[in-house]
Image (cartoon, rainbow, N blue to C red):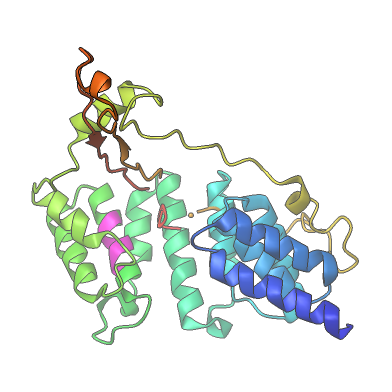
């Protein structure tokens, strides 16, 4: 690859990494730009797949990450593929992917994330007791705290709550919150919810009133745009000489992973002239409202 092209690709990949959490759509645009220049590079396909996942382009995420796995020989994003299958309403494929994985060859973090997604897929199918049983692994009770410990405990607590084991669920939400230093889950909030604690500013009636006021009213929650599918990402492997037939009958796949209401303020300044100050117009006052949105898994536990 020519040096100027390589530098351009590198800049796009850096931008993808920087934007993937804050602006997934823009991150995906950068990743696609890199793919147009270097579709045969595994890291580029990985970046497109992860950006597509964060942007909610589930089918493209599956296609690109499968391509990355074939090109690199790695199996580092099985949980993401499974979560995407779950998001597409195909939990059976997520479970098949879990069953077909070579657990001994997987990185422990990947194996745990894949387990969490598969348990969530069991829940999607109404097999809630099976989800609880799946998550009762030795890593759940180990004293050693790993990056995935909070998520595993959270998933187990959520599964317990789904089968009505409220007391046990509270215990595991508490244990998840204890090790969730980075606040990757909302375990602390779920714990307060189980204890009947209402967080100020999270009044559901107030939120409902503002939603009923409509998008044009001051303080109304802005409408969330629908996530459309990208035709460019969807054509991932059609024009790529490295792409295999991604729908080639693999028995596995996955499927799992809020609008943030913003305050709006109106302010009208005082009249600038004596005549205006003496006018009979009613003084305007600034108004603000705040509403707090709610969230979904991590996902749906994805």
Could you say which quadrant of the image residue 140 lies in? bottom left
Can the viewer see residue 37? yes
Rendered residue at 55%/64% (across/down): 20
Residue 129 inside the magenta-drawn segment: no
Can the viewer see residue 94? no
Relative to 114, 250 lies left or right:
right
Give x and y (percent) for residue 97.
59, 63
Relative to 158, 103 lies left or right:
right
Relative to 16, 273 lies left or right:
left
List the single residue furthest toward the top. Answer: 280
> Against 28, is 269 above or below?
above
Give x and y (percent) for residue 261.
35, 41
Residue closest to the eye, 64 or 111: 64
Could you say which quadrant of the image residue 13 lies in? bottom right
Rendered residue at 36%/34% (across/down): 221
Rendered residue at 80%/81% (across/down): 6
Magenta-highlighted residues: 153-158
Give x and y (percent) for residue 192.
13, 54
Characterize the magenta stretch by its predominant secondary structure.
helix
Give x and y (percent) for residue 69.
70, 73
Residue closest to the eye, 9 or 216: 216
Rendered residue at 34%/82% (across/down): 146
Q: Quadrant of the N terminus?
A: bottom right
> Against 60, is 38 above or below?
below
Q: How many marks?
A: 0
Relative to 11, 160 lies left or right:
left
């Amino acid at each position: 690859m020519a040096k100027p092209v390589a530098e351009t690709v590198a800049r796009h990949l850096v931008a993808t990494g920087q934007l993937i959490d804050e602006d997934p759509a823009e991150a995906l645009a950068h990743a696609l730009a890199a793919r147009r220049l270097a579709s045969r590079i595994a890291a580029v396909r990985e970046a497109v797949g992860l950006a597509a996942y964060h942007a909610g382009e589930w089918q493209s995420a599956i296609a690109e990450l499968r391509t990355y796995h074939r090109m690199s020989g790695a199996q580092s994003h099985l949980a993401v593929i499974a979560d995407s299958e779950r998001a597409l309403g195909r939990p059976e494929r997520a479970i098949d992917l879990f069953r077909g994985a070579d657990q001994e060859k997987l990185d422990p973090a990947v194996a745990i994330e894949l387990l969490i997604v598969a348990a969530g897929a069991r829940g999607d199918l109404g097999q809630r007791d099976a989800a609880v049983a799946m998550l009762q692994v030795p890593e759940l009770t180990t004293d050693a705290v790993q990056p995935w410990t909070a998520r595993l405990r959270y998933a187990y607590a959520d599964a317990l709550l789904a089968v009505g084991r409220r007391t046990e669920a509270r215990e595991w939400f508490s244990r998840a919150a204890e090790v969730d230093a980075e606040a990757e889950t909302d375990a602390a909030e779920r714990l307060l919810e189980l204890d009947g604690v209402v967080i100020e500013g999270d009044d559901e009636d107030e939120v409902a009133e503002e939603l009923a006021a409509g998008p044009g009213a001051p303080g109304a929650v802005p409408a969330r745009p629908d996530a459309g599918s990208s035709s460019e990402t969807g054509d991932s492997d059609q024009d790529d000489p490295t792409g295999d037939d991604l729908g080639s009958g693999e028995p596995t796949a996955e499927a799992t992973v809020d609008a943030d209401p913003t305050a709006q303020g109106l302010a009208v300044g005082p009249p600038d002239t004596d005549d205006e100050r003496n006018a009979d117009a009613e003084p305007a006052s600034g108004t603000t409202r705040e509403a707090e949105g709610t969230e979904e898994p991590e996902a749906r536990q994805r």
